[in-house]
Amino acid sequence: MKPDYDTFKEEIENLFRKELVIYFDTVDYANHLTDGSDELNELYYLRHRVETITRIRMTAALDALALSKMLPLDYEAARKWAKYTLQEMNHDKMFMGDLKRHGVSEDQVFGMEPLPATVEMGTFLEDKIVNWSPLAAVAYSLFVEWNSDQYSEQTVDRAEVKYSSSHVKGARAHVNFDVNEDHLEIMFGVAHSLLTSEQQMQQLLETCQVISKLFRDYFQQLHQNTVVENKRLSAA
């Protein structure tokens, strides 16, 4: 038997909070995007926005794969998932508009190789969707929406202070859109609807832990490829 909705939601959020502690304890520059105590590093910030667009486009294909697996399992959950994923597909435009205000073109964005952790994330999710459950795709969205709910507005505020409101117009719209559409609560509902047993709940938690680990790897690689690499080149 699967847990009731409130217990399910509490278990997921408890896990996410524990994973946040690990993130802040182990990742260099972990709070840089949200902590205003030092100046925002432009290379780090812009590369992160580029990678955000890359992930949006990558997960759009995975979301479609998950939809095909979800339809025979729970049509109503699939209907909600389809609406959510269609909305998410357009969010790359929001971040692209901001990057253009920084002088970063679409060709530059799509010409950048994704960081290894992003590629690994795509490979992991595809394997889990195909060989386990479309819940893997929902787990990713749950993780992203929950963390966005915690920190995205702080990141936008920080970038607006350094640049201008026009430089974060898309990112601000993205935050407001997610809140207004209540994306996080929708994802909790879809995930719980698809859940079938306590065993599957444990598999879902384990999947979320892997996703969290891959995001820690991503942010470590982001720091290495921007801040550390720039210091090395400057010293040379």
Image (cartoon, helix red, strand yellow):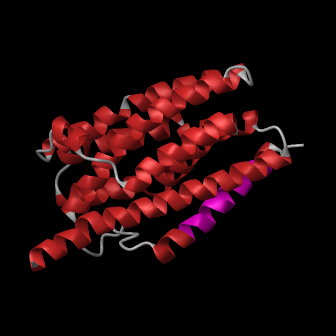
Reply yes or no: does residue 110 show up in magenta. Answer: no
- Residue 135 in sight: yes
Task: Determine whether, in the image, residue 35 is placed left or right of residue 83.
Answer: left
**Looking at the picture, how far across and down is residue 171, in whole percent?**
32, 44
Q: Please, is residue 142 above or below residue 16 in the view?
A: above
Q: Could you tell me which residue is drawn at 42 percent across and 37 percent down?
A: 58
Q: Please, is residue 79 above or below residue 107 in the view?
A: above
Task: Determine whether, in the image, residue 222 is placed left or right of residue 108.
Answer: right
Q: Please, is residue 36 above or below residue 197 in the view?
A: below
Q: Could you tell me which residue is drawn at 17 percent across and 36 percent down?
A: 107
Q: Nearer the viewer, residue 189 or 109?
A: 109
Q: Quadrant of residue 18?
A: bottom right
Q: Could you tell me which residue is drawn at 51 percent across and 44 percent down?
A: 123
**Quarter of the picture holding the C terminus:** bottom left
Q: Quadrant of residue 82?
A: top right
Reply yes or no: does residue 8 show up in magenta. Answer: yes
Q: Nearer the viewer, residue 212 or 11?
A: 212
Range of the magenta residues? 7-21
**Looking at the picture, how far across and down is residue 59, in whole percent?**
46, 37
**Looking at the picture, how far across and down is residue 158, in whole percent?**
28, 60
**Quarter of the picture holding the N terminus:** top right
